[in-house]
Amino acid sequence: MKVLKFGGTSVGSAERMRALPALIQGPEPRIVVLSAMSGTTNALVNITKLLYEGDTTAATYQTEILRQHYLIVARELLPEADVAAEAIGHLDASFKTIFNLTRHPLSASGERLILAQGELLSTLLFHRYYTALLGQPAVLLPALDFMRLDKDEEPDEAYIAEHLAVVLAPHAEQPLFITQGYICRNANGDIDNLKRGGSDYSASLIGAAAQAEEIQIWTDIDGLHNNDPRVVDDTYPIRELSFDEAAELAYFGAKILHPSSILPASKYGIPVRLLNTMQPEAPGTLISAKTGDEAIKAVAAKDGLVAIKIKSSRMLLAHGFLRSVFEVFERYRTPIDMITTSEVAVSLTIDDATHLAEILEDLRGFGAVEVDQDQTIVCLVGNLIQENNGSARLVFNALKDIPLRMISYGGSPNNISLLIHSSYKVRALQALNEGLFQPRPVANA
């Protein structure tokens, strides 16, 4: 069994959907996980925003625009009138769900129901194209029958494995299954989702539940690059990464991969391959348990950080101080990204400022508090178990003209993290590219 996930651009038009069959063929059974067509989730989010604002006229208008777009795609993808008519009937049912929700004040459950329609629509269209137009066998598996969150809003892996096996069992001889990414049910049985980018997470969870031999993530870029190609010239795809290295890069800003998507695969040692639907012959990036020899393989950056410094003489020779500080963040369910300490101060960063005012108020009970907004973490990832090759020196030489707010090194064998003001981000990434990766390594050429 292999699991293949295709992102929004890979199913973003009738033309792109017609290209998928060549990519999903294989001798082993395959589960194909689809995102919503590109632009759909953004459109649905905008519709829910309008409904929360009480602008039902605009929400209805935007829903009709989206419906017309899908009618055009359906007729282009399914030129046979009877096939198109059947598919359009299902499309209209999905849009009727949205239209009905525009008639009343929107609830959180209504919002989640609206957001689920994108994946339901893309899988419907592709399944009809693959089976009715191409005459190929495939089973449409509703993700809502087996994807579930637990009471802590985390994926219920035991439930997913048990119920995926149940829905697969009647189709033992089938070669292909098509299902939705992103959507699921919560512990109450209501429709929910895995948040933005969650289709990668769906694929990894499904791969773990099915004990797949490989998980493939198909996007519109040829693997995970060594730096941000949007602001740095001459980047290149990394051919191999370990699970830990990939998880660090995903968490700290590598956009091609959802931060949580590696965890279920790594738990069972299932290789994850990142591939490009626009250039399927490219080798992409293989993520596995193997760690290579390169000291620093890649750089990523995470924006939108807030740095908080708590300075107090009570820290000196005191036990329990840090625990008390961390309990403040736990109380407001706010994760900490990075931390450094001295004898009398602790500095840390958060990326969720929802409860910043309350957090700062509580922290002032411990001492003087300083806050720096608009911060960026630059993360350098590689095999850093033993620093005997001068990599740290190369990093700091490259950044000699960039003010560093915090440095974290040694907490992970795969990561060096640096905190800078966001205004220096582009300069820092370009300087690191020149100082660490030029000339371009032959192995990645």
Image (cartoon, rainbow, N blue to C red):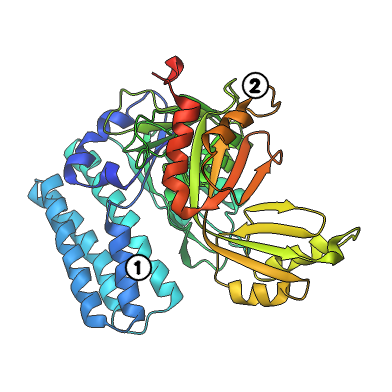
- Say which residue label 2 marks: 389
Q: Where is residue 197 shown, x and y percent of the image?
A: 43, 51
Name which quarter of the figure residue 321 lies in.
Answer: bottom right
Q: Which secondary structure, mark 1?
A: helix
Q: Is residue 66 left or right of residue 395?
A: left
Residue beneath the point at 66% across and 44% down? 408
The front one of 207 and 403 is: 403
Which of pointers 1 and 2 lies earlier in the amino acid sequence?
Answer: 1
Name the spot of residue 143 as percent of width and height, x first.
43, 52
Q: Mark 1 and mark 2: span between their CA atoms? A: 53 Å
User: Which quarter shows the C terminus?
Assistant: top left
Q: Dot 1, crowdedness within 10 Å: few (<14), some or many (≥20)?
A: many
Q: Is residue 254 visible?
A: no
Helix, strand, or loop for circle 2?
Answer: loop
Tell us which disc is closer to us: 1 or 2: 2
Tell me residue 98's x, y (percent): 29, 71
Q: Amino acid at mark 1?
A: Ile
Residue positioned 40% across, 32% down in the render: 223
Q: Is residue 232 above or below residue 201?
A: above
- The residue lying furthest to the top in this view is 442
Question: In this image, 132 relative to 345: left or right?
Answer: left
Q: Is residue 14 left or right of residue 295?
A: left
Instruction: Relative to 216, say whether 45 is above or below.
Output: below
Check disc 1 and report the residue beneath it: 114
The amino acid type of the residue labelled 2 equals Asn
- Contact, mark 1 vs mark 2 (Cβ under 8 Å): no
